[in-house]
């Protein structure tokens, strides 16, 4: 882990507005977590932790962060300073994909009009600021193939799970499917970051170790002692970006199936956060979140986090929520493993960053895909749906098609 000194050093300086943060991503090790132009990008790698456990990663990072000698010009700016980017497997007990926590050499960030650069090094901190990189290029012509299951077979699986739910075996099960896109040239993750930040600015665009996407769901943010979680469950497809949003929102709010699905997800998050928070606020009714491709029922839950509960520890307590797994959790997870015929890898797992104080942001890796190092000309895309007693297989398949749209459009350029 440490090629030189036993002491990791860091320096954070204020910088003029650097422009689009994604422009600093190069072809080497690159990380990003961006929304509405703000956020952080990481360049290069100081060290990484490979683990199957969020709790273990939290301990490893906490121990390393406590040793960092940090010289800074900025205080109390969210994310300004040493951070680690992480991407974790949905179900490490049933996945060949390892979870990772990566500490970058260089971090460029912006938050609320304040911009900064943090450099890190063993023993000494290199001088200089990064520069924008040449614009990435798209993958060109793509060929598409079904992943682990054809659409017809996946509809059959949904029908089978609906029957199980009606028989009382579970209340909700989230089922996923995948697509594979292949190109003649290696697919650049930073090309996707550029495209997604431009097209879906209200989501969180993420890139960590080949896992890339634009997710609308914040698993948990801890900032200044306040914990926030955005729960999304219940979806209606939007035929075009300018479709009648008011009509669709009314239909979503009137859907007993979607409201029940959302209620399961909210309860699972509130119950998981409660031991770590005080003064929690759980709204009684959801609001409708509009995206170009879909509308979601959404609820923002807040609470005062206990000082010892880091953002990564909170993420560990929350994952997997009912929004990406089901209810009851252990039964839904067993059914997913038994029936889905898919290694989700880090899809639907926590993705985000943590700073030296334990603050950070952890989204759920949705609306994304994985570029595997051994197959750089391919990307595996994922989409899932919450299945409840009233689910209709054809509708659920259509929902996955809508959820593939952000990545398909980003790839096509």
Image: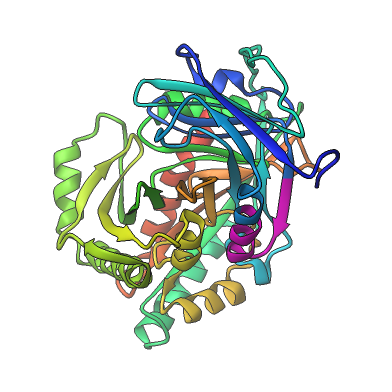
Residue furthest to the right in view is 3
The span shown in magenta is: 48-61
Q: In the figure, is residue 147 to the left or right of 413?
A: right
Nearer to me, 261 or 158: 261
Q: In the figure, is residue 199 to the left or right of 182?
A: left
The picture places residue 218, in percent across and down from the top left corner, at 39, 49
Q: Is residue 98 visible?
A: no
Residue pictured at 79% horizontal, 45% vertical: 6
Residue pictured at 77% horizontal, 34% vertical: 123
Nearer to me, 10 or 185: 10
Instruction: Count up the numbered dots.
Output: 0
Q: Is residue 60 magenta?
A: yes
The picture places residue 110, in percent across and down from the top left corner, at 44, 25
Q: Quadrant of residue 192?
A: top right
The picture places residue 196, in percent across and down from the top left corner, at 48, 29
Depicted 376 relative to depicted 37: above or below: below
The way the protein has been coloured in the rendering is rainbow
Depicted 279 relative to depicted 26: above or below: below
Q: Quadrant of residue 329?
A: bottom left
Nearer to me, 244 or 207: 207
Nearer to me, 78 or 20: 78
Q: Where's the C terminus, which quadrant?
A: top right
Residue pictured at 58% horizontal, 30% vertical: 71
Q: In the figure, is residue 186 to the left or right of 385?
A: right
Residue pictured at 33% horizontal, 56% vertical: 231
């Amino acid at each position: 882990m440490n090629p030189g000194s036993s002491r990791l050093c860091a320096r954070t300086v204020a910088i003029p507005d650097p422009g689009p943060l994604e422009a600093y991503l190069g072809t080497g090790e690159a990380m990003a977590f961006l929304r509405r132009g703000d956020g952080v990008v990481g360049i290069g790698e100081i060290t990484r932790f490979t683990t199957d456990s969020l709790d273990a990663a939290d301990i490893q990072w906490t121990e390393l962060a406590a040793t960092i000698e940090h010289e800074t010009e900025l205080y109390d700016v969210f994310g300004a300073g040493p951070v680690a980017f992480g991407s974790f497997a949905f179900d490490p007990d049933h996945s060949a994909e390892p979870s990772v926590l990566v500490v970058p050499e260089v971090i460029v960030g912006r938050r609320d009009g304040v911009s900064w650069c943090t450099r890190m090094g063993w023993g000494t901190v290199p001088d200089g600021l990064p520069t924008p990189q040449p614009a990435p290029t798209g993958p060109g012509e793509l060929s598409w193939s079904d992943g682990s299951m054809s659409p017809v077979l996946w509809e059959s699986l949904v029908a089978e799970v609906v029957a199980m739910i009606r028989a009382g075996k579970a209340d909700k099960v989230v089922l996923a499917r995948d697509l594979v896109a292949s190109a003649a040239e290696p697919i650049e993750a930073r090309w996707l970051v550029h495209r997604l930040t431009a097209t879906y600015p209200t989501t969180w665009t993420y890139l960590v170790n080949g896992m890339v996407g634009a997710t609308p769901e914040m698993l948990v943010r801890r900032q200044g002692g306040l914990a926030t979680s955005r729960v999304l469950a219940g979806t209606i497809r939007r035929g075009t970006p300018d479709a009648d949003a008011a009509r669709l929102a009314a239909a979503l709010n009137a859907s007993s199936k979607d409201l029940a699905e959302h209620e399961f997800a909210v309860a699972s998050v509130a119950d998981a956060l409660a031991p770590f928070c005080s003064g929690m606020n759980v709204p009684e009714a959801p609001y409708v979140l509009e995206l170009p491709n879909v509308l979601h029922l959404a609820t923002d839950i807040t609470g005062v986090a206990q000082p010892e509960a880091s953002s990564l520890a909170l993420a560990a307590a929350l994952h997997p929520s009912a929004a990406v797994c089901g209810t009851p959790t252990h039964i839904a997870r067993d059914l997913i493993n038994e029936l889905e015929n898919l290694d989700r890898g880090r899809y639907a797992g926590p993705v985000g960053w943590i700073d030296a104080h334990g603050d950070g942001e952890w989204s759920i890796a949705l609306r994304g895909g994985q570029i595997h190092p051994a197959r750089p000309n391919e990307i595996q895309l994922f989409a899932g749906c919450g299945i409840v007693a009233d689910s209709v297989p054809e509708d659920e398949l259509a929902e996955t098609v809508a959820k593939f749209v952000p990545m398909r459009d980003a790839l096509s350029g």
